[in-house]
Amino acid sequence: MYNFDRIINRSGTNSLKWDIKKEELPMWVADMDFEVSDEIVKALEERVKNHIYGYNIVPDEWYESYIAWWKNRHQYEIKKEWLIFSTGVVPSISSVVRRVTSPGEKVLVQTPVYNIFFNSICNNGRYVLESQLVYKDGKYSIDFSDLEKKLSDPQTTLMILCNPHNPIGKIWDKDTLSKIGDLCYKHNVLVLSDEIHCDLTKPGCDYVPFQSVSDVCKYNSIACLAPTKTFNIAGLQTSAVCIPNKKIYDKVYRGINNDEIAEPNTFAIQAAIAAFTKGGIWLDELREYIEKNKLIVKEYISRELPMLHLVDSDATYLLWIDCGKVTNNSIELTDFIRKQTGLFLSNGSQYGDSGKKFIRMNIACPKEILIDGLNRFKLGITSYEKRR
């Protein structure tokens, strides 16, 4: 039994999340406030004991750990020759954008979506093409008519799929993924599936690997996989790219190596192997804890902040909250809440134009911290309303 209630002081650790004022509470960036599993810590301690931290290779055990995890957890058979080590999902996405598209072409994303996708596209001289998800009755769905119209644009050559979807926490089902795959193939658009949140699903729910859906999906796609979000080891910079299509594999392999993101640091391999071979029990308990936190937030908002709507989610520890009855300016709202209460949240505008009235809240923290955050949230919302 792992203790997810334990509060860890992360100040003084050069933490991006916690490099804030003393009285502030960060519930923004996707970084958990839980201790890494004992099994991963032990593997790293064993490596530290060697006292020499030179260059590293990618051993067979690394490939085997990914293959076994996806087979046992997600019923998807990955082959060794499909996998490429990379230092992170975001560096991989940027490298893929540079390698499989040309400057001036369009990369399609379904918004609201992870904001760093925009950076990977725009910083490389490509254009973001948004196909906005349909938000109706507090739920999200895909406008396939709009999606196909934009995929059919001759300048659209790549689609970045978020599976499961951040920030709305939606798991795309097999039929939906199949339809996306068929449309992309029809219009000669390659799919890049970011599956970094795939293991952070609601207990009893599982995600569907995009490549497992059909041969069309398998051979017209690139999947980005990693243990980093799941096991809270993002700072160790370890991930994988999975590409069954040999022609696409060779192109991306050259890009990953040319961009110098194919060499593991001293701890990246050990952490990934330990996570995927020994982290299952820890993960299952974590998912139960996160689900309880979600229920706490849902009940709190229903009771104390009925003017807000919490979008139901089956994946991630990131909650998407509709503040439309309070304001359509989430930048102003989150800035106000932070100044008034110290609570640091993510404004929805950064996830696309359709996110302007939403905020994103990270609830991967001990219950005591969550309650503190919710009380600050209530104070911020009520204070904001009074000033109108």
Image (cartoon, helix red, strand yellow):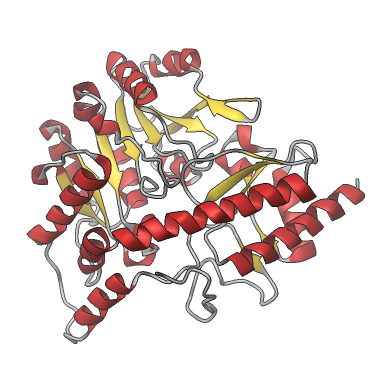
256 relative to 103, above or below: below
Residue, x 80% and y 63% (percent of image)?
340
Residue, x 38% and y 56% (percent of image)?
284
| Residue 12 image point, x, y percent | 52, 81
Q: Quadrant of the N terminus?
A: bottom left
Res. 375 visible in picture = yes
Asked where in the image residue 311 lies, by quadrant, the reply is: top right
Q: In this view of the protein, which residue sits in the foreground, 252 or 211?
A: 211
29 relative to 148, above or below: below
| Residue 167 image point, x, y percent | 53, 42
Res. 255 visible in picture = no
Task: Give the left or right position of residue 327, taking residue 263 as reference.
Answer: right
Q: Quadrant of the C terminus?
A: top right
Asked where in the image residue 63 lies, by quadrant, the reply is: bottom left
Residue, x 17% and y 33% (percent of image)?
248
Task: Give the left or right position of residue 123, taking residue 132 as reference.
Answer: left
Q: In this view of the protein, which residue sits in the foreground, 48 or 192?
A: 48
| Residue 306 image point, x, y percent | 78, 42
Q: In this view of the protein, which residue sits in the foreground, 68 or 115?
A: 68
| Residue 75 image point, x, y percent | 22, 39
Task: Give the left or right position of residue 325, taking residue 187 as reference.
Answer: right
